[in-house]
Image (cartoon, grey):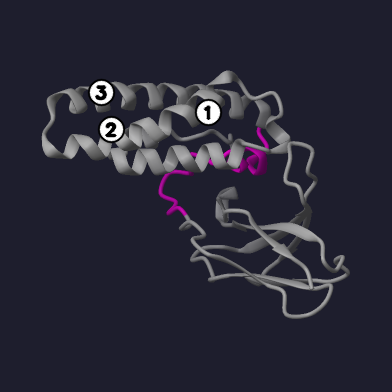
């Protein structure tokens, strides 16, 4: 099965497109797979706050704001398309790298996509331990629980533990040290859904 990015975001409403854009910039920034990201990433990071403000101000019917909103929407979609092409090239068919950029993959016809992971909880009740847990994802067959050392940079290397359970206990972590955690859910036909990254200082 060929792994490709879906461009369904082009049909999103303005609010959803803005949120999606922030998701992409958040996932790509500091991602070790995208150390040579094109200028479109930095440009999108600058465009999104302006797009968000103009979108809000256009609600009162201001024609100038409405036209600016349309222009910023076109620019945002163009930047996302450029980044999608870049991520696809860097992934080289690897679905993990593909979704780590914040984009969604095309799914097999007739296959229902697995829902996104909305909340990642990281519990640090015991010294040297961290428990990652998410709500069970409908359609998920396995979960990759991951952590990496702080700071989160383009050189960060994730330690990954795959489990059929939506929770996992990491042991042997350094006390008083800060780590970053995330979880990726895997469904049929290589479908995936990744959580946001969460940081914690270990007891």
In which quadrant of the rendered image does the N terminus lie? top right
Nearest to the eye among marks 2 and 1: give it: 2
Quarter occupied by residue 91: top right
In the rendered view, tell whether residue 166 sits above or below residue 51. below
Q: Which residue is mark 1?
A: 84
Give the magenta range.
92-113
Measure how far apart labels 1 and 3 are at the Cα level: 24 Å
What label sits on residue 54 in the rendered view?
Answer: 2
Q: Nearer the viewer, residue 150 or 100?
A: 150
Which SS does the magenta portion mostly show? loop
Foreground residue among 176 and 87: 176
Q: Quadrant of residue 143?
A: bottom right
Q: Of circles 1 and 3, which is in front?
A: 3
| Dot 1 alpha-carbon crowd within 10 angstroms: few under 14, some 14 to 19, many 20 or more | many
Left or right, 25 with reference to 132: left
Up-down: is 202 above or below 25?
A: below
- With 197 as the anchor, is 118 left or right in this view? left
Spatial CA span between label 2 and label 3: 7 Å
Task: Measuring from the top left, give residue 129's x and y in whole percent.
Answer: 80, 73
């Amino acid at each position: 099965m060929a792994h490709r990015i879906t461009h369904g975001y082009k049909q999103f409403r303005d609010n959803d497109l803005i949120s999606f854009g922030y998701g992409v910039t958040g996932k790509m920034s500091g991602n070790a797979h995208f150390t040579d990201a094109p200028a479109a990433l930095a440009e999108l990071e600058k465009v999104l706050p302006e797009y968000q403000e103009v979108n809000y101000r256009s609600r009162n019917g201001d024609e100038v704001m409405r036209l600016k909103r349309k222009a910023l929407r076109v620019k945002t979609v163009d930047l996302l398309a450029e980044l999608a092409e870049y991520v696809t090239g860097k992934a080289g068919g690897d679905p993990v790298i593909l979704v780590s950029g914040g984009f969604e993959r095309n799914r097999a016809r007739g296959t229902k996509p697995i829902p996104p992971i909305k909340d990642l909880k990281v519990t640090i009740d015991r010294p040297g331990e961290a428990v990652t847990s998410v709500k069970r994802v409908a359609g998920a067959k396995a979960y990759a629980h991951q952590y990496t050392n702080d700071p989160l940079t383009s050189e960060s290397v994730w330690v990954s533990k795959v489990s059929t359970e939506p929770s996992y206990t990491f042991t042997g972590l350094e006390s008083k040290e800060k780590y970053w955690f995330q979880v990726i859910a895997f469904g049929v036909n290589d479908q995936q859904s990744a959580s946001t990254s969460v940081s914690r200082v270990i007891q």
